[in-house]
Image (cartoon, rainbow, N blue to C red):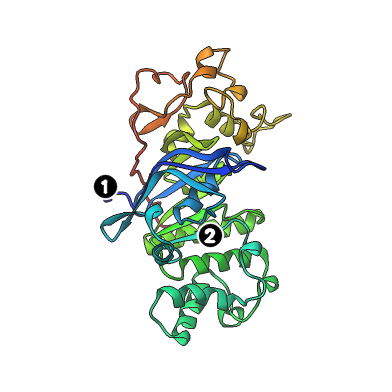
Amino acid sequence: MTDKPLLKIEDLAVSFPTSGSLDHRVRAVNGLNLSIYPRQTLAIVGESGCGKSVSALSTLQLIPTPPGRYDQGRIWWDADGQPCDLLSLSEKEIRRVRGNQIAMIFQEPMTSLNPVYTIGEQILEAILIHQKTRRAQARQIATQALTDVGIADPHARLDEYPHQLSGGMRQRVMIAMALACQPRLLLADEPTTALDVTIQAQILELLRKLQRERGMSVLLITHDLGVVAENADTVAVMYAGRIVEYGSVHDIFSQPLHPYTRGLLASMPVLGKRHERLTTIPGSVPNPADFPSGCPFHPRCVDMKDDPKCTADDPPLREIHEKHWAACWHTPGHNQAQTTTPDLSYRRPEAAPVV
């Protein structure tokens, strides 16, 4: 694998005004650093409101400005060997990237698809914008895209409207739209939300298959750690707009360093084990307009033990072990570790085909 990242986010901060005040702003993302390499799947995990979706939307400048604002940072994209900062591109320039080099699957397919246009019209739009082709040829590409995602009778489906399709089929249409122009990076924001378990498995297997065939990278946003364990190469755990742990999927699951990560893993039900009650993390994600002083996780942390340092200073993200980062004063080795930017090109070996 190349040692050059496809996408590199450096110190990204995105803020929004509080209600009733344009001057007072809160940061939904605060100092985000991560890298995605070719053919790699990076998963961003965390509770709702931690900044996962805002991070992905920022990559394509999809945050409305105003009211949103990119306060700092850069998002480097490998544009055919020439890195460019996606945040510095004009609206005309970023449109050449959206849906073409970088595509996105949004959370809710029913709200993401326009109900007054047919499926075909919505898929053809991106193809006609980014590819020099006639409408008849674009329709053939759209038909093939629906075939690739496992939709039967694709010719007929092109002329149907979103309300005529089931939730699973609408999600497949969203994937077909995203992949019609053969992007190098796919941003998948909760791609299996509101789908039943059987359809979830089919959608995730479809994404893995298409990734293998096309060699694309995937930024997977989810709160489902089971999905992460099965699909991700590297994992970034987010809390209160920042990364609190970063490492390979094996390190995160076998040796979690941050108490928030351990809490997330402990809250997962285990097949075959009976519990009276599932483990939960006390409290909830703090309001971005009123983050606590020091470490933002300290009001919910079981490791704090009334340590005044936790309430006074926000711990930096440090490389505790080789290629494994954490931001917690109580993580063994944190005080001696170096503060480095998380950057990991790891990719899990591909499973041998079933004969």
- Left or right side of 326 for 15: right
Q: In the rendered image, which residue does mark 2 sit on?
A: 105
Task: Tell me the distance, in whole angstroms, between the alpha carbons under discs 1 and 2.
Answer: 27 Å
> Residue 294 location, x and y as percent?
52, 22
Local crowd size for mark 2, using a 10 Å CA cut-off: few (<14), some (14–19), many (≥20): many
Q: Position of residue 222 (x, y in %)?
A: 55, 47
Label 1: how many Cα within 10 Å (few below 14, some 14–19, many 20+): few
- Tell me if I can see residue 348 in this picture: no
Give the mark, 1 or 2, whose residue is nearer the N terminus: 1
Report the amino acid beneath label 1. Answer: Asp
Q: Residue at x 48, y 20 (%)?
A: 313
Q: Residue at x 27, y 49 (%)?
A: 4
Nearer to the camera, 318 or 165: 318
> To which residue does mark 1 refer?
3
Q: Quadrant of residue 49?
A: top right
Q: Secondary structure at mark 2?
A: strand
Q: Amino acid at mark 2?
A: Ile
Query: Residue 316, percent across and down?
Result: 42, 27
Residue projecting furthest to the right: 276
Count of labels in the image: 2
